[in-house]
Every structure is written in structure tokens, then in C-alpha cells.
């Protein structure tokens, strides 16, 4: 198998699936102590024999019908070639009172409408929580005087924005009529940041360590690369870029991403 990943998305996803599954077939999960690299931060591992669980064309069409619009081409390719993992990951917690390892799923199961709704609520919850506690982004316009009106205004803005399409963890793209690349955003603690220029870049950054790709090889994502069509979500973004400095690697850990 070639060391260098293809540039086009479909060949890349097949290449990525083949290489990761080959590694996971014989991977032995590490002990919890081996993951305790930064105090009070969580880490993740993969179960032996984990494989990707792609959706069929029929399943994707049914989900698009349920959503009321077609998905972006790049997102359909992701669902149809990778889709998610066939078993939960292993999550290690290191905060106060944490012990042992739990099974958790960072992906999204599109065959379960309730799961998708919960993931979308998780993405918007922190923004609404911050607004409820007095934080107001200038890009949202003049702040209404009452708490209720602020919450209502943000809820309306989110409702009018393109629909959130979760990928992995806090990462998501938006339901737009765009070809690949499709910028990936991440929402955590009320902050929205550009995490990757594309689904391809997201996978290389977060999962490339499984196949020998250092995250330093993945170029930083720049705010200016977010299309204006991202609407509310672009307005909500802090003008942050993602570069793998030590501070930002700690932030990545807090987002549930394991850097090695």
C-alpha cells in the first residue's frame, strides 16, 4: 500500500479504510496508565478488530429523505465508504474520581434519528449555555436586553443556518450544496473553530497516527477558508486557526482527541 494518501476524496477514503483496518486487526489496546500523558485529560483507544461500518446507497437515500434535502457529495462519500466504526471506542478518563475504561462512540449513527438529534443538541448546547450566562458574540448583532430574547434570537439564527452534519466527536460540516473540500468546524464550550479544510484533512489529523502520519504534516486550517455560506456558524467563529502547538494539542485532548 502506498505511503502517501491520494488527494481525491473517494480514493483517499478507500485507501484510509484499508490501512486503518489492517492496523486495527492486530492492535492490542493499551493499558490506562499508558494513556495518562496529560493530567486530568481523557484519552481514546480502538478495540482489536475494529472496522468501518459504511452505509449503503439505499440507507443514505432514506436518511436524505428524512432530512428533507440531499447531503453534500463529500459527506455522502464519507458515509458510504467509512460511515463510522462498527464498535465503540475505549475511553479513558483521568479526572478526579475517574477510573478504568468505558466504551463510548464518538461517531454518529445515522440509522438512529434520536442519536443524530442528540449529537446536534450537543453541538448547539454550549453556545446556548454561554448566551444564557451573558456571553454575546458581536457578530450576532445587538444584544437583546432580556435573557429569554437572547436565547430566542440565537435559536432562530441556528434554525435558519444550514443544518449541522456531525462527523466525529465535536466535528461537523454543514448541509450545503458544495463539492469536496467541505470545511470541518468544531464546537466546544461555546467556541466554534475551523478544525480542518476538509473531511480528508480531518481524518489525517485525528486518525493519521494509526497509519504513521504525524499531525505536524497536516497544514493548519485558516479562518479565511470558511465559506460565507456557513452563515451563523462562520459568524460564531472566533478568529482562531488550528496549528499543532503544545497549547492547542492540550485543547485537542480536551476535545477527546488523542495525539501520539
Image: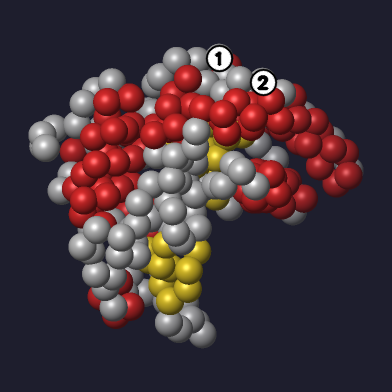
Looking at the image, residue 112 lies above or below residue 34: above
Q: Is residue 50 shown left or right of residue 142?
A: left
Q: Under tag 2, what secondary structure?
A: loop
Q: Is residue 90 left or right of residue 230?
A: left
Q: Quadrant of residue 99?
A: bottom left
Q: How many marks?
A: 2
Q: Residue at x 38, y 55 (%)?
A: 257
Residue 166 location (% of width, % of height): 55, 40
Q: Nearer the viewer, residue 250 or 58?
A: 58
Name the residue at the left extreme: 2
Marker disc for residue 69: 2
- Disc number for residue 35: none
Question: Front-most of 199 and 227?
Answer: 199
Disc nearest the viewer among 2 and 1: 2
Q: Position of residue 89 (x, y in %)?
A: 42, 62
Residue at the (47%, 20%) spot, across then down = 73
Q: Position of residue 94 (x, y in %)?
A: 42, 76
Q: Which residue is mark 1?
A: 177
The answer to whether one can see residue 32 in this image is yes
Q: Does the rendering let one see residue 193?
A: no
Q: Position of residue 147 (x, y in %)?
A: 85, 46
Position of the C terminus by quadrant: bottom left
Amino acid at each position: 500500500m502506498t505511503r502517501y494518501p491520494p488527494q481525491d476524496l473517494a480514493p483517499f477514503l478507500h485507501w484510509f479504510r484499508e490501512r486503518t483496518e489492517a492496523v486495527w486487526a492486530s492492535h492490542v489496546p493499551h493499558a490506562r496508565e499508558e494513556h495518562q500523558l496529560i493530567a486530568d485529560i481523557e484519552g481514546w483507544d480502538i478495540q482489536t478488530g475494529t472496522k468501518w461500518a459504511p452505509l449503503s446507497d439505499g440507507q443514505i437515500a432514506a436518511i436524505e429523505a428524512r432530512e428533507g434535502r440531499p447531503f453534500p457529495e463529500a459527506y455522502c462519500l464519507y458515509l458510504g465508504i467509512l460511515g463510522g466504526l462498527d464498535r465503540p471506542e475505549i475511553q479513558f478518563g483521568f479526572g478526579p474520581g475517574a477510573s478504568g475504561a468505558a466504551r463510548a462512540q464518538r461517531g454518529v449513527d445515522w440509522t438512529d434519528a434520536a442519536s443524530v438529534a442528540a449529537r446536534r443538541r450537543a453541538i448547539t448546547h454550549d453556545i446556548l449555555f454561554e448566551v444564557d450566562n451573558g456571553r454575546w458574540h458581536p457578530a450576532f448583532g445587538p444584544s437583546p436586553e432580556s435573557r429569554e430574547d437572547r436565547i430566542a434570537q440565537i435559536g432562530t439564527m441556528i434554525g435558519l443556518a444550514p443544518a449541522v452534519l456531525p462527523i466525529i466527536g465535536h466535528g461537523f460540516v454543514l448541509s450545503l450544496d458544495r463539492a469536496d473540500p467541505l470545511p470541518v468546524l468544531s464546537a466546544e464550550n461555546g467556541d466554534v473553530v475551523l478544525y480542518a479544510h476538509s473531511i480528508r484533512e480531518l481524518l489525517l489529523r485525528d486518525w493519521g497516527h494509526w497509519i504513521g502520519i504525524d499531525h505536524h504534516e497536516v497544514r493548519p486550517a485558516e479562518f479565511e477558508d470558511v465559506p460565507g455560506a456557513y452563515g451563523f456558524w462562520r459568524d460564531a467563529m472566533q478568529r482562531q486557526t488550528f496549528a499543532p502547538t503544545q497549547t492547542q494539542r492540550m485543547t485537542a485532548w480536551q476535545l477527546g482527541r488523542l495525539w501520539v
